[in-house]
């Protein structure tokens, strides 16, 4: 069953199209990663889903309803980002108690256990926390709320790598026990891909890919070797990235539509065939130039 359904969704700010003609569905009880470069429209899309913004054109439905100013949708949704507005006159433990009153699935014991694990003092005040500690507290709220739809928009800003890793594990363990629909927007795809069922990649406000992670991992292939051989091999294929390695050699990333016989012949001709990391693939897919930054220097 669909938790979210978008049809030709667009949002314009002062003639700038932040989201343009987006159509997709997100099923219940899956973790979907939302990926795109800065300015791609990720946060605008998430705010449209959360009902914070009204679409310019098209429609968005959450739990079968228009989310804009909809109390029933809002009661079953939580939106966590680094701009979370929390009361400054309450301690962390008082804040958790207050937040818990809004969410029927709130897990007070889990929230307290996570607070202790991440060394947050119950009597501290949110305004006095560092950036990373604020992100940690925000994540605790997002996990403990156990909302049917949980949205994390770059929630780990300021956290060090060890803390991020623990939070990913906490989120996954809780999700496995209590499945719900989670959207996780992050620049750190390599860190979160083990969490994800699907990935939605947007570019300039438009949907570029929406695939299960298993399909994304096989979407492209890296080829390293003599340029003449690789060019002939990839003549009709979609080239996503290319980089000269020397006078006669090249590294090239192409859409993986090759049959096994073609790949085997390439290996016999000295071509090295390698998988493409998902975070690298997303960078290549959203780049303006197939040669990356090297294109700037090749023209000068």
Image (cartoon, helix red, strand yellow):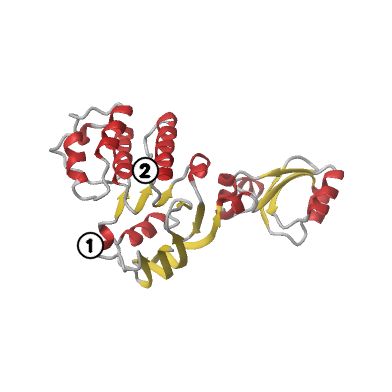
Image location (x, y in percent) of residue 122: 21, 30
Viewer-nearest of discs 1 and 2: 1
Q: Secondary structure under badge 2?
A: loop
Rendered-image quadrant of the N terminus: bottom left
Can the viewer see residue 189 in this picture?
no
Separation of marks 1 and 2 at Cα, in angstroms = 24 Å
Q: Is residue 208 left or right of residue 82?
A: right
Q: Position of residue 88 (x, y in %)?
A: 16, 39
Q: Residue at x 21, y 32 (%)?
A: 128
- Taking depth in this image into account, of 139 and 206 the one nearest to the observer is 139
Q: Percent position (x, y) of residue 110?
A: 30, 36
Q: Is residue 90 visible?
A: yes
User: Which residue position is annotated with label 2?
Assistant: 155
Nearest to N terminus: mark 1 or mark 2: 1
Q: Which one is nearer the viewer's eye here, 193 or 117?
A: 117
Work out whether 136 lies above or below 63: above
Q: Residue at x 19, y 33 (%)?
A: 125
Residue with the mark numbered 1: 71
In the shown orientation, is residue 122 left or right of residue 4? Answer: left
What residue is drawn where x is 35% and y is 61%?
A: 49
């Amino acid at each position: 069953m669909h938790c979210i359904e978008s049809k030709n969704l667009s949002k314009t700010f002062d003639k700038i199209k932040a989201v343009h003609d987006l159509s997709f569905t997100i099923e219940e009880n899956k973790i979907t990663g939302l990926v795109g470069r800065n300015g791609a429209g990720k946060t605008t899309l998430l705010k449209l889903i959360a009902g914070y913004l009204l679409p310019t054109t098209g429609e968005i439905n959450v739990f079968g309803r228009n989310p804009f100013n909809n109390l029933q949708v809002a009661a079953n949704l939580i939106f966590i980002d680094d701009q979370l507005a929390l009361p400054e006159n309450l301690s962390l433990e008082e804040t958790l108690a207050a937040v818990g009153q809004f969410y029927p699935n709130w897990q007070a014991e889990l929230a307290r256990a996570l607070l202790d694990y991440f060394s947050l003092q119950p009597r501290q005040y949110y305004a006095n926390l560092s950036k990373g500690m604020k992100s940690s507290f925000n994540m605790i709220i997002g996990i403990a709320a156990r909302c049917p739809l949980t949205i994390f928009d770059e929630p780990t800003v300021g956290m060090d790598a060890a803390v991020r890793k623990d939070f990913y594990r906490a989120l996954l363990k809780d999700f496995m026990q209590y499945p719900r629909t989670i959207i996780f927007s992050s620049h750190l795809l390599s860190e979160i891909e083990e969490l994800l069922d699907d990935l939605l990649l947007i570019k300039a406000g438009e949907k570029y890919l929406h695939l299960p992670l298993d399909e994304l991992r096989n979407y492209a292939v890296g080829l390293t070797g003599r340029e003449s051989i690789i060019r002939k091999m990839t003549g009709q294929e979609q080239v996503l990235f290319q980089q000269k390695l020397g006078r006669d050699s090249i590294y090239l990333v192409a859409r993986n539509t090759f049959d096994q016989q073609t790949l085997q012949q390439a290996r016999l001709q000295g071509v090295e065939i390698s998988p493409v990391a998902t975070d690298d693939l997303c960078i290549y897919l959203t780049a303006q130039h197939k040669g990356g930054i090297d294109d700037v220097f090749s023209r000068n």
